[in-house]
Image (tube, rainbow, N blue to C red):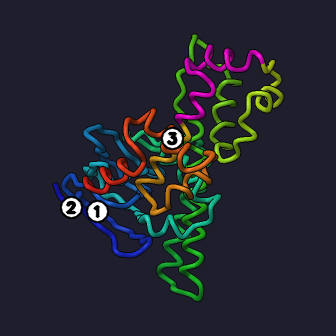
Amino acid sequence: MERKNIYQPFEVEYKEMNECPMAPHRHNFFEMVFILDGTGVQCINENKFNYRADQLFLLMPQDCHSFEVKTTTKFFFIRFSNIYLQAQHKEWVQKLEFIFENNNHLPGCILKNTSDKQLVRSLVEAIIREQVNQQAYHLDLVQQLINTMITVVARNITFSTPVKLRGKAVNTTSLDMVHYIHQHIYEPEKLKAEVMAHRFSISPAYISEYFKTHTGENLQQYIIQYRLKLVEIRLRHSDLRMNEIAFELGFTDESHLNRMFRKYNGQSPSEYRRAVKATA
């Protein structure tokens, strides 16, 4: 299967297609695809979805995907590499990690908030104008517009964050707790049971049982496993040293990170990183 690469931190491309020129392929970068006009079928990891105008798709490295064009389609592609990610501010990288962890690798538009579709279209049209006009600081402005789009993506992914809710009705408090954990995963003090209990007006003695009743998962185990998923993302997509990862994700030290990672993954972080690079 063909693999595609990019050779700069990010690139944007506008294409109008009467038929899709690409066979199913994989690539080593992240890609957002916005449909300005047209209809067809998106295929990602052997799942298919009918696309139309004002839809946005997020494609991850190693996803297998293609588009089958039915009516003339105007595509807008935004591609960015690990180099681009590593150059961003810490808070923005954390936002990206939330997207990577919660994107489900299935086909379909990721814009769940209807009003955001017009916002994203406006951002895409602004990027296209900047690329055409090439005025002073246009690259800086394009980068800011791309980051704004990624922020919109993060917001929409929060609307479909997977959680195993029990019972027929969705419990909004338990969803709020999950979103709170994701938001404050880099702030261990805010994830203590007594702090969360106060935040959600639940007894400290009952909060863990409450979380498990409505999600099917132990509160502390959920926090640990989510934190370890972010460790995996750092290991796959950055060159950070183990002690840096341990510090940023709230582990006591590198040894603590190694013990927890091995307990849940059956191998050390270094072994995991080597295995990922060997198969890239």
Q: The N terminus appears in which quarter of the rendering? A: bottom left
Name of the residue lying farthest toward the front: 255
Instruction: Give the magenta part as a residue range.
Output: 205-225
Please check the rendered image and state whether residue 219 is part of the magenta-colored stretch, yes or no: yes
Residue at image mark 2? 21
Using a 10 Å C-alpha cutoff, classify the residue at mark 1 as few (fewer than 14 neighbours), some (14 to 19) or many (20 or more): some
Question: Contact (CB < 8 A) between labels 1 and 2?
Answer: yes
Q: Which of the two discs, 3 and 1, sits closer to the camera?
A: 3
Disc on res. 91: none
Q: Which residue is mark 3?
A: 228
Determine whether, in the image, residue 254 is placed left or right of residue 205.
Answer: left
Q: What kind of element bears circle 2? A: loop
Count of numbered tags: 3
Q: Is residue 145 left or right of residue 27?
A: right
Quadrant of the image occupied by residue 122: bottom right
Observer-nearest of 2 and 141: 2
Give me the C-alpha separation between circle 1 and circle 2: 8 Å
Against 25, is 192 above or below?
above
Q: Give the mark, 2 or 3, whose residue is nearer the N terminus.
A: 2
